[in-house]
Each structure stands twice: as structure tokens, then as C-alpha cells.
Image (tube, grey):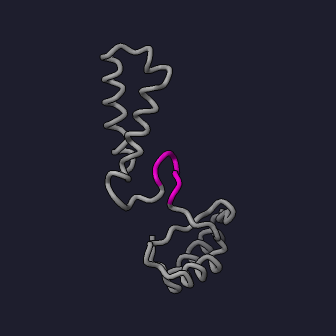
Amino acid sequence: MCRATKADCEELMRCLSQYGHISGQLINVEKSAITFRAKVEEDTKQWIKNRSSIQLEGGTGKYLGLPENLSGSKQDLLGFIKATMQSRMTGWYAKTFSKGGKEILLKSIAMALPVYII
């Protein structure tokens, strides 16, 4: 969303503060997380965490069923598609389908998941 610099952090916090003042909606820092690039220095990370009051670092979990961090190898990135398809195909409802029904289920899942990311 922005660079990991003090100036960008200050501007982002100013925008979020102004949005909160206008809308009445505030950030829940207990549920929020920040994701940094690998090359960001530790002291910069700590400064941004302190300024934003968000102490949790994210990027390794999932949000709405999708990986939070969409970088790295394509194999790792799209590995969740394979895992999702395997879980759907071993579910109780997949066992009751005919071969044709399983094929349609497989195709619909395989085609929908990559589009869902974008």
C-alpha cells in the first residue's frame, strides 16, 4: 500500500485519522496487522509499529480464505488452489457425485479460485 518510511507512515496515519474523524469508524489495532517487505530494517519496522499502535506482523495467514501475502513463488502462491480442491473433492458431497458431477465440481472450483484473487 505504501513504502515503509516514516513520511509514508505519517501520511497514512493522517489519512486514516481524518477518515475516522469524518466517518466515526476507527481502526481496531487489536485485530490489525502490518506486513513488511523482507528488506525493511528492524528499527524502521519498530518505529512504524509504535507510530501506528499495531504491533502484530502479518503476511503468513489467510484472509477470506486467500493467502495474505501474494508474493514469492507461483507454486506456493497457487498452492492454496490445490489444497482447496483436494478438500472439496474429499468432502462428503463429492463422494455422492458421479464421475461427470465430480468433473464439473473440479472445473468450477479450479476456474473460480484464481479469478477470486484478482
Please name the residue shown 37% across and 52% down the image.
76
Q: Quadrant of residue 100?
A: top left
Q: Quadrant of residue 89?
A: top left
- Image quadrant holding the N terminus, namely bottom left
Nearer to the camera, 13 or 53: 53
Q: Is residue 16 magenta?
A: no
**Residue interval drawn in magenta:** 60-67
Q: In this view of the protein, can residue 24 be seen by the observer? A: no
Residue 10 vs 96, above or below: the answer is below
Say how many tags the image has: 0
Q: In this view of the protein, can residue 23 be seen by the observer? A: yes
Nearer to the camera, 38 or 118: 38
Q: Is residue 61 magenta?
A: yes
Please name the residue shown 55% across and 63% down the image.
58
- Left or right side of 10 for 1: left
Residue 70 vs 109, above or below: the answer is below
Q: x%, y% of residue 62?
A: 52, 51
Q: Quadrant of residue 27?
A: bottom right
Nearer to the camera, 99 or 32: 99
Q: x%, y% of residue 118?
A: 36, 51
Please name the residue shown 69% across and 63% down the image.
30
Q: x%, y% of residue 55?
A: 64, 70
